[in-house]
Amino acid sequence: MKQLEYQKPNRLTFKEGNPKTDKNKKVEGLEKYRILRLNLAPADLSGFNVCPMASAGCKSACLHTAGNPVFQKQKDKGRINRARYYFQSRVEFLNQLTKEIKNFEIWCIKNNLIPVVRLNTTSDIPWEIHNIFELFPNIQFYDYTKIYKRAVKFVKGEYPKNYHLTYSLNEDNKPQAKYILKRGGNISVVFRTKKLPKRFLNYKVFNGDKSDLRFNDPKNVIVGLYAKGRALKDKTGFVQDV
């Protein structure tokens, strides 16, 4: 495949500036958690597909476009650069990523904070193939995924203990989601309603919008999320009406 142009990023990850991952700072008992996040250009926006199981509804409602539209062009450029860097200079990318995670861990220790890392903020890459979680046993990693095989491996206990996965419901994977629930896992569901239902698919609904720290959620629940931005206009079935 022809090399796609990109500028090598000076920085891959960020620990501030994302309303979703910064919510815990205002929640009693969760103030000490700090989330380091990696954002790549979602789906195939970069010319490389980082979301292999993304549905039409998922793509249209992606939080990649959330925030001030004035900065969207700049945001697109940065995330495209990082995605192309990952696919076309893999070793160098992973070396830089590892260094940034290590520096983040040191920074958290110095500031008496709890380090957390979310690598798939706008992607769905199986980072386990790079053995990153094992390199940092004292850091909690977590992600959402629509890759069923990854979710199954998680509920079977086949991932390192410091990695947590929440399976995401979309318009065409309800049977798979039900299986994950039966095995004791959690699934995230986006609701259009202004008030989350108490139960969905016969499972308790937990408010996942209070913070993004999915590894702290109760086990075997529906992680309810409110539809935001373009998701409010979804007609594919990705957003649930109850």
Image: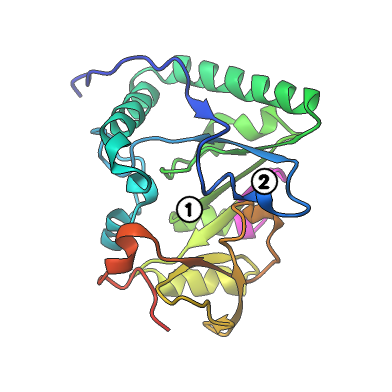
Residue 145: image tag: 1
Residue at 78% from the left image edge and 27% from the top image edge: 111
Front-most of residues 81 and 192 = 192
Per the rendered image, the range of residues in magenta is: 154-164
Residue at 69% from the left image edge and 43% from the top image edge: 160
Residue at 23% from the left image edge and 33% from the top image edge: 47
In primary-sequence order, the first of circles 1 and 2 is: 2
Front-most of residues 188 and 15 = 15
Badge 1 crowding class, 10 Å Cα cut-off, few under 14, some 14 to 19, many 20 or more, is many
Please state the horizontal and vertical placement of residue 90, each as a whole percent of the image. Answer: 42, 21
Badge 2 crowding class, 10 Å Cα cut-off, few under 14, some 14 to 19, many 20 or more, is some
Name the quarter where the C terminus is drawn: bottom left
Please state the horizontal and vertical placement of residue 149, each as a whole percent of the image. Answer: 48, 55
Magenta span: predominant SS is: loop
Left or right of 152: which side holds 162?
A: right
Please state the horizontal and vertical placement of residue 9, each as a whole percent of the image. Answer: 40, 17
Please state the horizontal and vertical placement of residue 61, each as a whole percent of the image. Answer: 32, 58
Front-most of residues 133 and 203 = 203
Is residue 170 one of those drawn in magenta? no
Name the quarter where the N terminus is drawn: top left
The kind of residue tagged 1 is: Thr
Front-most of residues 110 and 134 = 110
Is residue 159 one of those drawn in magenta? yes
Q: Is residue 231 depicted above or below 192 in this figure?
A: above
Q: CA distance from mark 1 to mark 2?
A: 24 Å
Pointer 2 residue: 25
Residue 57: image tag: none
The kind of residue tagged 2 is: Lys
Q: Report the coloring of the rendering.
A: rainbow
Left or right of 98: which side holds 108?
A: right
